[in-house]
Amino acid sequence: MSITEGLKRGTIEIMLLNILKDNDLYGYQICQEFEKRSNGLFQITEGSLYPVLYRLLDKGYISDRKELVGKRRTRVYYRIESEGLEYLKKITEEYVSLNRGILFALGYGDLEVFLDGNKNCD
């Protein structure tokens, strides 16, 4: 597994819960939101998404509901629950803290400089 893939796996839960915080969505819509919110830099397939959704369902952080679309097709919509909102707050704080520490360790203590791209990684 590449470094990028490993980092992505660690951020899927936080991004997924943050997306569901705004709207109830079905799988394909969630994948589209991942790409849209990351300006195309983060793409997730439905095959990678569903194991995370099932894990969050098992933990009670999200719930699902089925809706009939047309005569035979069913869509499963996912919704964040209050426990999921609490978990999102906790993991967001931890994620931001961890990333700030990493940025400081890499010499990007001034986040504005990092975001502006004014510092080289040499």
Image (spheres, grey):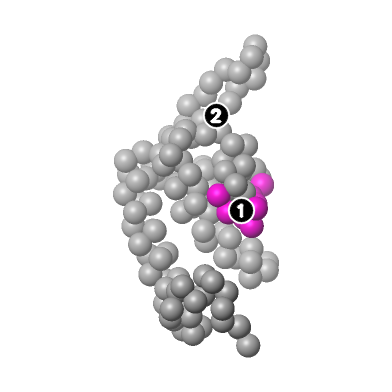
Front position in the image: 112 or 103: 112
Q: What x and y, as percent, mark residue 36?
A: 60, 47
Q: Which residues are magenta?
A: 37-45
Q: Quadrant of residue 5?
A: bottom right
Front position in the image: 54 or 86: 86
Front position in the image: 47 or 40: 40
Front position in the image: 114 or 51: 114
Q: Is residue 50 visible?
A: no
Q: Main secondary structure of the magenta part?
A: loop
Residue under the image location 57 percent in, 74 percent down? 117
Query: In the rendered structure, which amino acid carries the disc numbered 2?
Result: Val
Q: Secondary structure at mark 1?
A: loop
Q: Pointer 1: residues within 10 angstroms few (<14), some, or many (20+)?
A: few
Q: What x and y, as percent, mark residue 9?
A: 57, 59
* Label drawn at residue 76: 2
Residue under the image location 57 percent in, 17 percent down? 68
- Decide if residue 60 is on the left or right side of residue 46: left
- Quick check: is 72 in the magenta stretch? no
Tell us which disc is closer to us: 1 or 2: 1
